[in-house]
Image: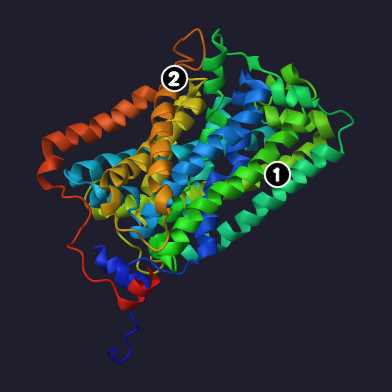
Amino acid sequence: MFPPGAAPVTDDERRLRELGYTQELARSLSGFSNFAVSFSIVSILSGCLTLYGTGMNTGGPAMITWGWPLVGAFTLCVGLAMAEICSSYPTAGGLYYWSARLARTRGPAWSWVTGWCNFMGQVAVTAGIDYGAAFFTNALLDLQFGLSATPGHTVEIFAVLLALHGVLNTFGVRLVAVLNTVSVWWHLAGVLVIVGVLVAVPDHHASASFVFTHFVNNTGFHNSFYVAMLGLLLAQYTLTGYDASAHMTEETHDAARSGPRGIVNAITVSLAAGWVLLLGITFAIQNYGGELGSATGVPPAQIFIDAIGERGAKVLLLIVIGAQFFCGMASVTANSRMIYAFSRDGALPGSRLWHRIHPRTQTPVNAVWLGTGGALLLGLPALWNSTAYAAVTSISVIGLYLSYVIPVYLRLRQGDSFVRGPWHLGRWSRIIGSVAVAWTAVITVLFMLPTVRPITARTFNYTPVAVAVVLGFAGVWWAVSARKWFTGPRTPAPTPLPHAELEKR
């Protein structure tokens, strides 16, 4: 019996208590809403199009076309391995919490590294998404009002978009859930409209040979294999951010199942729709050199103009910008939940400030503004560095995938002693997890390498510098102070699961 007036404790809340936390966030998201957050952050209309110009230089149509399913297969392995762990530990901390629970020894240290990698990746992916949206918004404003696509104008638009996403995320998770649901249908309908128009309207389409086999190298490097590997950044940057489903589990009903499904479904739906989108745009190319060197600075915008005319191009750009706006908003949501959870365990400077919950909206408002402020700082080098955007996307990929794979590696070390949740991979766990670890090792090295030759101050890939600064700060802080007091997330001794949960398992 419950005390008069007291609400019954749900299985989700009971499981959260077993994991060391009480319910503070509003648990109002459905399984679909959980999926919608991750799908919105993956955002094929954001990642595929903002880095399309990069893909045109690093491998061209052949790598744009074949790099997507190749990267997608490896990404799905990473997502499946993460989903299995998410089912066992559905908390907002997600990855860094998993590392603490899965490590056989030195759990706090593993948790610390994972959390800081995820923090870096989350901030960088927010910067990458909103800066990409600023690119496209500037291109539309240039077409409509003559606002030239300069770095200064783009950074100003970038700052405005971040501010808007910060404001929207302070109004509560219910508004965010509604907007993310709209985002799913906007993305899917947007892909159908864009591809449909690009198929039906142009008088000329590129040949299948061009789309599937034409290789382009405008990097200055003479090794085609190296350039082709650089071209994988387009797909790998797009297929990030699906850990958002894990970070939203404390706000999701039936979290031990909905969280894993959100991760996997976000990847699989994005894979199918994204390939259709890339093929549609690549077949619509009319003048490769002219579109790559477009005055708008956004090759897909020029492809739209050349294929269907300026008026129709503006409509398609509005569809893309709308999708990118939804994507940035969802990224700030996931970023703030990670900051909230990490600071709840004292792992960020000023943690007491960042994990405060607004009493009316039940959202971590201060964490929202820390995430958007960090993203703004990360995007500012674009004012003087022409390859800064590629560096931001590389930082997001490296930070996020390191944080993804550390708990997967620790889960592999546990072997059969790992306690599975209701959603798991069965006998495929070890194979899939091993592939995920190996792939992450490859892309971590790859995306730190130079992207343009000759290497100058304007073309230098500052990814290694940014990664070294963040992880160096975290490492020094750990060695000097944090190792003495950071014990990781709250990890109590296991308590018996409720009977209903045991029955499910």
Instruction: Tell me the quarter of the picture where residue 221 sits.
Output: top right
* Mark 1 / mark 2, whichever is N-terminal: 1
* Identity, as a three-letter code, of the amino acid under mark 1: Leu
Q: Is residue 17 above or below residue 457?
A: below
Label 1: few (<14), some or many (≥20) within 10 Å?
some
Residue identifier under label 1 = 318
- Secondary element under disc 1, as helix, strand or loop, is helix
Q: Is residue 86 left or right of residue 472?
A: right
The residue that appears at 71% across and 32% down in the rendered structure is: 301
Vertical order, 44 against 92 (above or below):
above
Q: Nearer the viewer, residue 379 or 478?
A: 478
Q: Is 74 placed above or below 108 here? A: above
Q: Relative to the observer, which residue lies in front, 371 or 45?
A: 45
Q: Residue at x 39, y 71 (%)?
A: 504
Residue 390 drawn at (x, y percent): 50, 26
* Residue 156 placement (x, y as % from top left): 53, 35
Q: Which mark is residue 461?
A: 2
Q: Amino acid at mark 2?
A: Asn
